[in-house]
Image: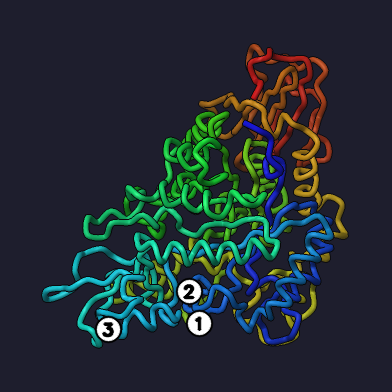
Amino acid sequence: MEREWWHSSTVYQIYPRSFKDSNHDGVGDLRGIIEKLDYLAELGIDVIWLSPVYESPNDDNGYDISDYYSIMDEYGSMEDMENLIQEARAKGIKIIMDLVINHTSDEHPWFVESRKSKDNPYRDYYIWRDGEDGPPSDIGSVFSGSAWEYDELTGQYYFHLFSKKQPDLNVHNPEVRAELHKMMDFWLAKGISGFRMDVIDLIGKEVDEKVLTDGPQLHPYLQEIHEKVLSKYDVMTVGETPSATTETAKLYTAPDRHELDMVFTFEHMSLDEEKGQGKWALKPLDLSELKTVLSKWQTELHGEGWNSLYWNNHDQPRIVSRWGNDQAYRVESAKMLATLLHLMQGTPYIYQGEEIGMTNIRFENIEEYKDIETLNMYKEKAEQGTAHEEIMTSIYAKGRDNARTPIQWNVTESAGFTNGKPWIQVNPNYEAINVEKALEDEQSIFYHYQKLIQLRKERDVIVFGKYELICAEHEEIFAYTRQLGDERLLIVVNFYDGHPNFSLPKGISYADAELVISNYEDSPIRPDEFDLRPFEAVVYSLKGSGDENGAY
């Protein structure tokens, strides 16, 4: 596998609505991002993944696109977008955009035309079917209810796997694919450096056979995108693929297949939900399951594909609240989780606010929530008779608005996000948790992330080294090694708030051990045997140990 620029890069996801408001309307915007580029450069990130900024009615916060070639007024103008690309590049930061090609908005001109008549030239741009005494099938929407919406004008149903205002494109139509290729070319020509492809595993769907993910034409369509568009540019691509296994991830990401560079697995993200019952059915995380899943992805893709490393994004709750301790050990557990992830092989993704340890939000009233998935779930569960308190427990744990409260920049009103009324309430803990405070504290979570990012640039063993899980049966410790040639790293983290004892397994020498990074100021300088403190994370370099088998 040839070395690529994104192998040692770290990506920072910006959800623009909640990042920084420059014009005081309560909504983050592109100029707000430009204002904060120096902050991102100081953190050391290489790439910004920009969540959708296209023209949109905003039914699903921008993932319902009505014009792929325009910028939503709330976010600014095309000139602002071009300035962002240029100014980020001047600071050594690339931009990748969200690519949403599974569906559009129902206000997109293609759909406006498509619904006019059965013989309209755009009819086949979307998925229309007849229904007898109801929807054509029992396929359900991700956002609750049926995935079919009846349209009275032509007496047919259209398919929408998400909101009814997000009709699915018929990607089997070669005219649709040609339009999508043209749009991708437009943005790449403007100087962006790639795409994060939204629910890309759905574009080969065969709804009549009830095949939604991994349809038979999925990989040919991705190869076509690469051939007709991506191959002309030096870019990175990452696919959102909730259905991916390690085997299918190899199909997506093997370099000789010319599809994607990496994918987002969801396997570790479902470990705290009851199997088969969806994200809202909560269960405690089992550390042994997390070890198994992450280790499987590390070992099975090594040399054959490439991993994306993430805990957070705009759809997931804050990791320090989810699997850390966001009260007594917020700083320690946030650093522990960062260390555990960033020393693995793959391209790490940081979600805005993660680098300062932002936490989940608990709104008392459902009316304070903005997310369509959350609101639809609440309505559906309430109609089924589920108690308000029980529904809210699930929302507090898994609701998408946990990630969408504004970035906490300082202690001024609205946390320095806006001088207006924020589109969603700011987390009230902003006086204790904010960027300004983090930058003033040399031991802050921010500087720990900064060091992790720099280590990836300096040490090829982090980028290319072989992964091996150790202490696999330990109920509190997650430990592994990375090895490249004669350099070996030992990563040991205490996942909980106890004081477990760590003993170096036989066969691993601590000769010439060097403490590389820790989340406590006085961690042991030799890793032979010691008691770990709550959420302690330590990384050692063990030069000269092992053999040559770690070569990539």
Q: Which residue is mark 1?
A: 57
Q: Amino acid at mark 2?
A: Asp
Confirm whether residue 446 shows in the render: yes
The alpha-carbon separation of the residues under discs 1 and 2 comes to: 7 Å
Observer-nearest residue: 236 or 172?
A: 172
> Which disc, if any, is residue 117?
3
Sequence-wise, which precedes: disc 3 or disc 1? 1
**10 Å neighbourhood of mark 2: few (<14), some, or many (≥20)?**
many
Q: What residue is rendered at 73% in x and 76% in y?
A: 80
The secondary structure type at the circle numbered 2 is loop
Q: Position of residue 145 (x, y in %)?
A: 29, 71
The residue labelled by disc 2 is 64
Position of residue 131 relative to residue 358, above or below, is below
Report the side of 509 relative to 91 (left or right): left
Colour scheme of this structure image? rainbow
Identify the residue at image location x=41%, y=78%. 110
Would residue 358 be visible to someone looking at this image? no
Q: Position of residue 141 (x, y in %)?
A: 33, 67
Residues at marks 2 and 3, CA–CA distance in whole angstroms: 22 Å
Amino acid bearing label 1: Pro
Residue 111, percent from left and from top: 38, 78
